[in-house]
Image (spheres, rainbow, N blue to C red):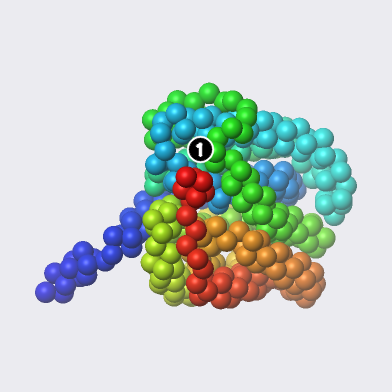
Amino acid sequence: MSRLGFKQRLQGLHHDHRRIAAGALRVAFFLLLGKAAGAFKEMAVAYRYGVSDTVDAYQFTMVMANWLPVTLVGALSVVLIPVLVNLRKHSQAERRLFLEQLLGWALSLGAVLALVIYAAWPWVLQMMGKGLSPSVQQMSQELLFAFAPAALLTVSIGVSAARLRARERHINTLLDSLPAFMILTMVLLAGASPGVGPLLWGTITGMFLQALLLFALACRADQLWLRPRLGCSAQQWPALLKAASVMLIGQVAMSFVGPIDQYTAASLGSNANATLGYATRLISVVLAIGAASVGRAALPVLADIQSQGEQTRARALSLKWSMLMLLVGAVVMAVANVLAPWGVALVYERGAFTAENTQAVTHILRWGMVQMPFYFAVLILVQLLASQNRYRAMAAVAIANFLVKALLNPILSARMGPAGIMVATSCMYASSFCCYFILALKRVPVVLPTSEQEN
């Protein structure tokens, strides 16, 4: 009877809940496979490099060089997915025009970003990396030969991933692991003193393959093979650019969190960046599988509901999922704190990574787990406001989050070391959840897609 009752309850769930749950399960499955590749990569890097200057250089370069491209892609993806969901209702000619113009501008923007990053890197090292040793700065300059062109690939990957997510297809999540897989391969093939070469070539090769495969899959999903063209004649551009410009303000504010962490860690002494990076990457695995899976699945569903004019249903759905994820995040935090020493030792402790390094990373990791409930819960509410086109409110919350982080980082890191950086992040997500929850409770007028308003 209990098995039958459970089956009946599952069948009794609303179709929208089942769509989000099914999408989240697919994303979680792909994330699990992808993060497994990432975990093996981390094992290989820890074995070859330990907590060393090379890892310091890689962590610093990865965060700082990716900052601007990831910021722009993050802002574009949030506003682009609702537009792409609505685009499915248009003719093939209209869809082709917009997607080809989108591709043309994405490639152009990526090329410009790559040139800007390469030209500005000496200044970045001077201003943000002044706490790094000369050898770390030299290795960072070498790694730039991978991370500068990666800006172009990041923009291309972001656009293709948004196209797939708008179709509620989440294979892009699995392909996110290609750079990690290629780094793993390069590191394993390298000798005992590999230098930065395996990290450099693994990054650029993996991202190139990821961009190529995602573009092919997105064209197949849209049933359109595209060629890039420049222009803004498609009717979706005015509303998209307006929304993106507002969203970009908040995204830029939040994007400073990574560089602030790198700057703060660099000022704490040698190898603080590497230690913080090891803990951060473990946390990102849990965050991705536990929360990002639901968030990525929720946005296209909520955008579809909003496009039907059912704002109340979308709001109720989001609040229920947010409360559920708050509870799940609390459970994950408790379990992860108990398993943290075992997990760090399992993933990292071998070769150049010592038991002392395990203790240092575990300490930071436990403080970082405090963010779990708030991050899990807020991600659903972010998707709700995005589907409602409330980008100004989202930008305001992002600026508030940045101020909380910027204020607490130096205070807490001075008292707690790298662990204080994690506590500041947890406080930032707690304040973010409170703001988004209050905003989600407010009823807003139904906003039809721009194309419908114009018609």
What number of labels is visible? 1
User: Within 10 angstroms of label 1, few (less than 14), some, or many (20 or more) residues?
Assistant: many
Residue found at the far front of this picture: 455
In the image, residue 107 lies at what x, y percent?
63, 31
The residue at 47%/32% (across/down) is 94
Judge whether 22 appears above or below 240 on screen.
below
Q: Nearer the viewer, residue 202 or 235?
A: 235
Say which residue label 1 marks: 160
Asked where in the image residue 158 lies, by quadrant, the reply is: top right
In the image, residue 143 lies at what x, y percent?
72, 37
The residue at 47%/30% (across/down) is 96
In the image, residue 128 lies at what x, y percent?
83, 52
**Which element is circle 1 on?**
helix
Q: Nearer the viewer, residue 200 or 437?
A: 437
- Looking at the image, residue 223 sits to the left or right of residue 64; the answer is left
Asked where in the image residue 429 lies, by quadrant, the reply is: bottom right
The residue at 71%/46% (across/down) is 68
Where the N terminus falls, by quadrant?
Answer: bottom left
The residue at 79%/74% (across/down) is 411
- Looking at the image, residue 322 sits to the left or right of residue 282; the answer is left
Judge whether 402 appears above or below 308 on screen.
below
- Please state which amino acid type lies under the numbered disc 1: Ser
In the image, residue 139 lies at what x, y percent?
77, 39
